Image (cartoon, rainbow, N blue to C red):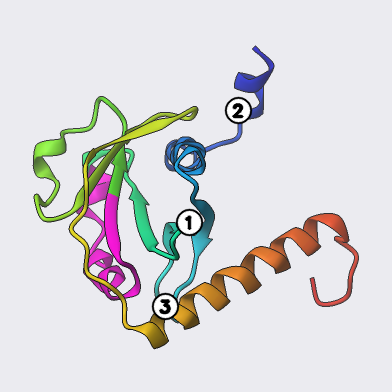
Amino acid sequence: MAEDHDLAGFQPGQRLARGVARYLRSLGFVSVEEFVPTRGLRVDLMALGPKGEIWVIECKSSRADFQSDSKWHGYLEWCDRYFWAVDTEFPVEILPDETGLIIADAYYGEIVRMGPEEKLAAARRKKMTHKLAMDAARRLQALLDPKLPGM
């Protein structure tokens, strides 16, 4: 299958992020991978929903990957909902109950537990929406014109 060949260079977490992004798109969300909401933090996926909601999704490919993540609490203040994305083999019982859960593979995903909603303050929502738009536009411009100075 040609599509499987396209995934050859992807790491397990990147495969999960791809499937989650596809799933979120079916819900009307757009997302940016490897997004930096603030200095020192990098989330696997930051998603913007059709009503302006902002979700953070962290993709974990193994128990060790999850256990080595000590920054995830810091992501909560940058989103309305927080989710873990894992595959069907992941030991989901180790994930905190007070977070959302998406089961995914490289092709799709599904929410199995909705993360609790903690609405962002209006100023932070505006800042994150603007930052998401700017980051996505820069990435698109770099793809369309990779020799543009400053890219």
Q: Are marks 1 and 2 in contact (CB under 8 Å)?
A: no
Q: Quadrant of residue 88?
A: top left
Tell whether label 3 touches label 1 (CB within 8 Å).
Answer: no
- Is 69 colored magenta in this rendering? yes
Cα separation, mark 1 vs mark 3, equals: 14 Å
Identified by mark 2, the residue type is Ala
Q: Secondary structure at mark 2?
A: loop
Residue 83: image x %, image y %?
A: 28, 51
What residue did someone put label 2 on? 8
Q: Secondary structure at mark 1?
A: loop
Alpha-carbon span between mark 2 and mark 3: 36 Å
The structure residue drawn at horizontal position 26% and vertical position 58%, both measured from the top left corner, is 69
| 25 lies above or below 53 | above
- Give the side of residue 139 with respect to residue 13, left or right: right
Residue 101 quadrant: top left
Residue 19: horizontal and vertical position, in percent?
Answer: 47, 35
Residue at the image point whose x is 45% and y is 57% from the top:
49
Q: Which residue is mark 1?
A: 50
Amino acid type at mark 3:
Arg
Residue nearer the viewer, 67 or 113: 113
108, above or below 32, in the image: above
The label nearer to you, 1 versus 3, is: 1
* Image quadrant assignment for residue 148: bottom right
Q: Which quadrant: the N terminus?
A: top right
> Extreme front residue here?
51
Q: Residue 123 location, x and y as percent?
A: 41, 87
Name the kind of residue labelled 1 in the image.
Pro
Front: mark 2 or 3: 3
Question: In this picture, which residue range is highlighted in magenta?
Answer: 64-83
Q: Residue at x 49, y 27 (%)?
A: 107
